Image (cartoon, rainbow, N blue to C red):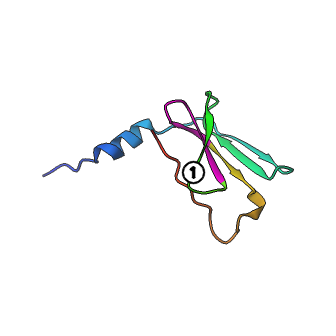
Amino acid sequence: MSRCRKPDAERRTLQDAVVAEKVRIWFDAEADFLEVRFSDKPGFMRETKNDAVMERVDKRGRVLGFSIMQVSRLSKQRPIEAELETA
C-alpha cells in the first residue's frame, strides 16, 4: 500500500499556521472597523487582494490576525473572502 504525502509547500503552510488558544475581537462602530487577533506579538498590517481586508503579520510574515474595514457595507447574502498569506 502506498502512502500519500503532502507537497512540501502545503506541509510548510500547515507547520507555520498560527494556532490560537485565545482570539481577541474588536469592533469600532464609529470607525466601522473589525479586528481579529490570534496573537498579541508585535506585527504590522499588510494589504491583501481584498480592499476591505488587511492582515496583521509578524516580521517573518506569519499571520497574527486580520482587520475588515467598512464592515457595515458587507453584503449579508455572501461571505467576504480573503487569502491570508504565509511567509
Q: Quadrant of residue 14?
A: top left
Q: Which residues are magenta?
A: 53-65
- Disc 1 residue type? Thr
Outermost residue on the left side: it is: 1
The answer to if 73 sits in the magenta stretch is no
Residue 26, position in %: x, y? 75, 43
- Compared with 51, 41 (above or below) is above
Residue 7, position in %: x, y? 28, 47
Q: Quadrant of residue 51?
A: bottom right
Residue 10, position in %: x, y? 35, 46
Q: Residue at x 57, y 51 (%)?
A: 48
Within 10 Å of the Cα at label 1, are there few (<14), some (14-19), or many (20+) other Cα atoms? some
Q: Residue at x 76, y 50 (%)?
A: 33
**Label 1 element class:** loop
Task: Count up the numbered dots.
Answer: 1
Near-viewer residue (59 or 3): 59
Q: Residue at x 49, y 46 (%)?
A: 85
Q: Which residue is identified by label 1?
A: 48
Outermost residue on the bottom side: it is: 77
Instruction: Specify the principal SS of the magenta part.
Output: strand
